[in-house]
Amino acid sequence: RTVYLNGDFLPETEAKVSIFDRAFLMADGVYEVTSVLGGKLIDFDGHLKRLERSLNELDMKKPAAFDDLLSIHRKLVELNDIDEGLIYLQVTRGAPGDRDFVFPDPETTEPTLVLFTQAKPGLSNNPTAKTGIKVISIEDVRWGRRDIKTVQLLYPSMGKMMAKKAGADDAWMVEDGFVTEGTSNNAYIVKDGKIITRNLSTDILHGITRAAVLKFAREAQMTVEERPFTVEEAKEADEAFFTSASAFVLPVVEIDGAKVGDGTPGSVAGRLREIYLEESLKAAV
Ligand code: PLP
């Protein structure tokens, strides 16, 4: 696989980063994951805008190649011959000469920019769309700035492991009784035809897929309610589903062992998945 590191396209075994890189020592970095369908980038603008926002929120310098990000993405897709898959991008505060809690001077420490591809043949044809997934609920103990897409992913990773141990596929995190989001996705329920998902704040990541799906839902005259919901409300909903750049829209059929609706994927989730794939593919770059 060919990867990108600070201006160079290299074989993955030759791409090396300093042990003093702030992401390695302090999770001081932000990232984006963009999906590729038919060799094209889905929702690229949204991902780029969110990256810019994450960098601003953390007073991080844009990497020098920021303006070239679209061409770097395209070149990696081409070099690795990706038809369906993902592109991972990470920007870190770089590698000062030593470990220090104080941010390094951005004049002397350049950010580290890394991109790599992950081929995922069949990404758009996920069989899970027809079966749905099972989630468990777990306490949300993450930090308070979940709107910034940092590489600090230990708790979401632990949440996935808790789900696997419990025989489920993912975990929905709960704070003060209300669902925040999934370990790597935004959470939704459907009740009496209404699509309900948590409103944007610092409590959740502002999903790029979420924004697109809600826009398409409104355009299709569906009712959207942006507000927190409880696990109990989710268990009594007609349907549940989640969205993310790597999964698009996928149905949730079980929460903490209780069936959602009749325990099969719902029609609203199915329709939104179809619309999202069709419309986002049309707008792919
Ligand atoms: N919420 C969290 C915690 C995530 O990690 C992600 C994606 O990685 C999402 C939501 C979904 O965001 P997006 O649709 O931009 O992929």
Image: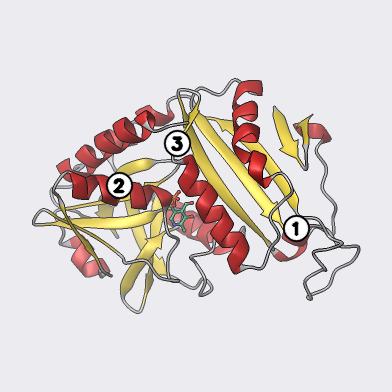
Q: Is residue 94 above or below residue 6?
A: below
Q: What's the residue type where badge 1 is placed?
A: Phe
Mark 3 surroundings: few (<14), some (14-19) or many (≥20) residues within 10 A: many
Circles 2 and 1: CB distance less than 8 Å?
Answer: no
Residue at 16 percent across and 59 percent down: it is: 237
Q: Where the N terminus falls, by quadrant?
A: top right
Of all residues shown, which one is farthest toward the right? Answer: 97
Q: What's the residue type where badge 2 is placed?
A: Val
Q: Earlier in the sequence, mark 3 or mark 1?
A: 1
Q: Earlier in the sequence, mark 2 or mark 3?
A: 3
Quadrant location of residue 4? top right
Residue at 62 percent across and 45 percent down: it is: 89
The residue pinned by badge 3 equals: 42
Mark 2 surroundings: few (<14), some (14-19) or many (≥20) residues within 10 A: many
Instruction: Give the mark count.
Output: 3
The residue pinned by badge 2 equals: 213
Of all residues shown, which one is farthest toward the front? Answer: 67
Q: Say if disc 3 is inside 8 Å of ligand 1.
A: no
Q: Earlier in the sequence, mark 2 or mark 1?
A: 1
Circles 3 and 1: CB distance less than 8 Å?
Answer: no
Mark 1 surroundings: few (<14), some (14-19) or many (≥20) residues within 10 A: some
The residue pinned by badge 1 equals: 24
Of all residues shown, which one is farthest toward the left? Answer: 192
The Cα atoms of the two marked residues, 3 and 1, are separated by: 29 Å
- Residue 275's x, y, as percent? 25, 36
